[in-house]
Amino acid sequence: MANTPQAKKRARQNEKNRKHNASLRSMTRTYMKKVQAKIESGNHDEAQAAFKAAQPIMDSMVNKGIFTKNKVARQKSRMVTKIKALKSA
């Protein structure tokens, strides 16, 4: 356990930041699940609209350090591929 006042303060800050980051991570995952649900329903237009709503949020989480750049790029790429497959099907 933290003994110095500085260490105690850092422990408080770390816990506060952890909860905030968890909230942002959860929100982003919810948007990603909405896109996936629209893809599974088979509606191209709705899936495209959901992706357009999720994309800026995913990018902002990269800037905040919640997710890594490559992870978000990979997930966006996979979503776009699935959405394009819906249009051709």
Image (spheres, rainbow, N blue to C red):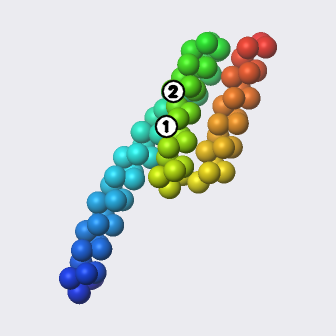
Find residue 86 and report its horizontal and vertical position in percent.
Answer: 72, 17
Residue receiving disc 2: 53
Find residue 31 and report its horizontal and vertical position in percent.
Answer: 49, 32
The amino acid pointed to by label 2 is Ala
Find residue 23 and report its horizontal and vertical position in percent.
Answer: 36, 46
State the separation of the CA atoms marked 2 and 1: 7 Å
Residue located 59% across and 54% down the image: 68
Quick check: 13 above or below 5? above
Q: Can residue 66 be seen in this snapshot?
A: no
Q: Can residue 70 be seen in this snapshot?
A: yes
Residue receiving disc 1: 57
Q: Secondary structure at mark 1?
A: helix
Residue nearest the viewer, comparing 6 with 30: 6
Few, some or many residues within 10 Å of mark 1 (<14, 14–19, 20+) = some
The amino acid pointed to by label 1 is Ile
Residue nearest the viewer, comparing 2 with 40: 2
Q: Residue furthest left?
A: 5
